Image (cartoon, helix red, strand yellow):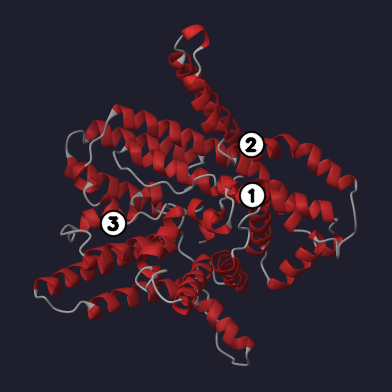
Amino acid sequence: MLFSSSVFLFAFFPAVLVGYYVLFRGMRRAQNLFLLAASLFFYAWGKPAFLLVMLFSIGMNYGFGRWVHAWKRQCRYLTTPVAVAVGCNLALLFVFKYLMFTVETLNALGLGLLVPVIELPIGISFFTFQALSYVLDVASGKTEVQRSPLNLGLYISFFPQLIAGPIVKYSTVARQIEGRRETWADFSAGCSRFLVGLGKKVLIANQMAVVADRVFAMDPAALATPLAWIGSLCYTFQIYYDFSGYSDMAIGLGKMFGFHFLENFDHPYAARSISEFWRRWHISLSTWFRDYVYIPLGGNRVEKGKHIRNLFVVWLLTGIWHGANWTFLLWGLLYFCLLYMEKFHRLGAGWPSLLRRGYTLLAVNFLWMLFRSDTLAYAGQFFLVMLGLGGTGGWNGTCSLYLQENAVILAFALLFSVPFARRLRECLETWRPCGKDLSLLWDMLYALGLTALGLLAVASLVKGTYNPFIYFRF
């Protein structure tokens, strides 16, 4: 079930609001149980069988948390329970996400193994990392053990962040599970944030997806170089507005129920280096790897060789986390190479700010093409076309048609990928023509703008426009 779907907007979500705020108002345990039931129903909507995987993960990690807690009380070393917890969670992820790829790879080397057909449970990478963060936070003493399996189940399965993040660490929301407070200010802010995310997803990402999917469905040999660039830029904007829009909706939904999740995006395409880009893009994933992999390995407070090793391990795992394909592995390793050049050879240091932004966006755009390609061979052919070394040559009528049809959306995508809206609002809030305070006027205009945005998005959905979601595959 997508947030940007009619069944969610007009049936599931209104029913959850009524149950939470009308039927169980003031009854925290009943509210939590209701949210847990609603979240499990939400997850089971597309494929009920996957609910068994979710329940197994909840039960398994509840047991690991109690095991770690018991050993801590006995002052015993936690190496064994933590290692078993990590191994079992990664084994679950491996079976569903990587086993088929591993067997196919072994067969390519000459083995004749039977390739199992295993369907990928939606969001398994996200909820596995969340569940694992609970056990690791209990082991490190960042939080207390959760004695209620229902509360832990709510944390792991809570529907706003279940299938696409942000990856919420247990220590961030542990006290909110029973001690949160719902306020009108949070609810209204959550509604606003949800509408912004819905607009990003439906009005920009979905439109960009149409062009990107058409271009990437073509044989690279039949592509003109300008059309390849148009397709690549559309995908670059699609993945940003798709994922950041979904994160906005998740954060907004959380606020409506009193939960406060950390930000997951901060205008990454305005970054002036690859290091800064990854401080702004999918912040929850970068933070997870930093806290649970990079820092435990020593981080940057070690000798140069070990620092390079730590970066390599993190980016190898980042590539693997995104998918079972050689394209994702190479994607992660190329980011390691760029970060290595920036950190140890000062790539881009001293360049003018505009040039640094251009280099970063260009590098990110090229690497998204690898991310989008199904095979390394296709990615290589597509890169050659973008560089003018393949395809059908220069500008043609198809390029003109695609650009004319999408010029306005591309302009809006570029404009709002940088902090334009934030800067505009700050300027308007401090503007005092003739000494008059216009803040109330701007608030009214903002509310009207959000209403119009929501209506446009809903109208687009009702029309049945193309509505894919990239991160379901992860």
Q: Which residue is mark 1?
A: 357
Asked if residue 464 can be seen in this view, the reply is: no
Provide residue 86's location: percent of width, then percent of height.
33, 74
Q: Earlier in the sequence, mark 1 or mark 3?
A: 3
Q: CA distance from mark 2 to mark 3?
A: 35 Å
Q: Where, by quadrant of the figure, is residue 332 drawn? A: bottom right
Q: Residue furthest left?
A: 74
Residue 414 in sight in this render = yes
- Three-letter code for the amino acid on which mark 2 is drawn: Leu
Residue depicted at x 56% and y 42%: 201
Residue named by callout 2 = 415
State how far apart marks 1 and 3 are (Cα): 35 Å
Which of 347 and 129 lies nearest the eye of the viewer? Answer: 347
Q: Is residue 452 above or below residue 374?
A: above
The amino acid type, in three-letter code, at marker 3 is Tyr
Furthest-front residue in this view: 350
Task: Confirm or deny contact between disc 2 and disc 1 (CB under 8 A).
Answer: no
| Residue 451: percent from left, percent from top | 50, 24
Q: CA distance from mark 2 to mark 1?
A: 15 Å
**Label 1, residues with CA under 10 Å away: few <14, some 14-19, many ≥20:** many
Residue 429 in the image, given as x and y percentages of width and height: 47, 21
Q: Which mark is residue 170?
A: 3
